[in-house]
Image: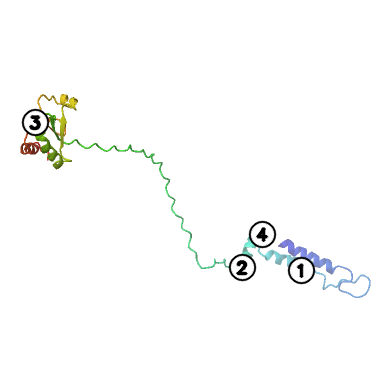
Amino acid sequence: MKRFIIVVLAGTWALLTQPGCGGAGPGPAAKPDSLEPTVGEVLGISAKADSVTPLADDTAATDAVNASQPQAEQPQPAGGNLKPAVEKPKEPPKENSPPEVEQPAQVPEKPKPLPRMWDYGADNCLPCIQMEPILDQLAEEYEGRIDIRVINVYQQGDLARMARIQVIPTQVFIDSDGKELFRHVGFYPRDSIVAKFREFSFE
């Protein structure tokens, strides 16, 4: 700041000391005493300049000027105050699930065998012929509950040997587990057969 005042004073002094300044007519004009500044005036001005408090630096001066000016308002977004966007919580990474193991196809269980009553006989046997209508009627009546058959020992000899048949007719009662429960040799009336069914819980 001091330098600026001194430069201004020096420029003014140069203008005042130029020829023709302050007088009329040709030739060097006498410098009027009133226009020539004295050393005291210069010193007085310099003293005034000393009385001015210098700013610390250019930055402080700029800050002071900015502080004196009104601050421009920040533009507001259209639509008023906008709420900040809410971030959706991140889903946790899915754990690697073990691969699904294909279950073997379930094999349906075989139905449990029915209890049975097999009559071993032949076509040339009179008691065997007498039992045929009784056995046919029982087979129809207990269908799906008891396996009732007539085995011809001459045509199905392998079954007769497995059952160890020696005399005909012979009736053999076997449960659902294949266990023989009872056998009868000779003619066997209907009521006696039904009674055995009840006794062995075949019904």
Distance between the alpha carbons at the discs numbered 2 and 1? 34 Å
User: Could you say whether the residue bearing mark 2 is in a helix, strand or loop?
Assistant: helix
Q: Relative to the observer, which residue lies in front, 97 or 126? A: 126
Instruction: State which mark lies toward you, 2 or 1.
Output: 2
Give the residue pinned by disc 3.
126
Q: Is residue 52 left or right of residue 136?
A: right
Q: Are marks 4 and 3 in contact (CB under 8 Å)?
A: no
Instruction: State which mark lies toward you, 1 or 3.
Output: 3
Instruction: State which mark lies toward you, 4 or 3.
Output: 3
Kind of residue indicated by mark 3? Leu
Instruction: State which mark lies toward you, 3 or 2.
Output: 3
Give the residue pinned by disc 1.
41
Distance between the alpha carbons at the discs numbered 1 and 4? 29 Å
Q: Picture quarter containing residue 9?
A: bottom right
User: Where residue 181 sits in the image (x, y, percent)?
Assistant: 10, 31
Give the residue pinned by disc 4.
58
Kind of residue indicated by mark 4? Asp
Q: Residues within 10 Å of mark 3 (few under 14, many from 20)?
A: few
Give the residue pinned by disc 2.
68
Instruction: First in sequence, mark 1 or 3: give its number.
Output: 1
Q: Are marks 3 and 2 in contact (CB under 8 Å)?
A: no
User: Where residue 67 sits in the image (x, y, percent)?
Assistant: 60, 65
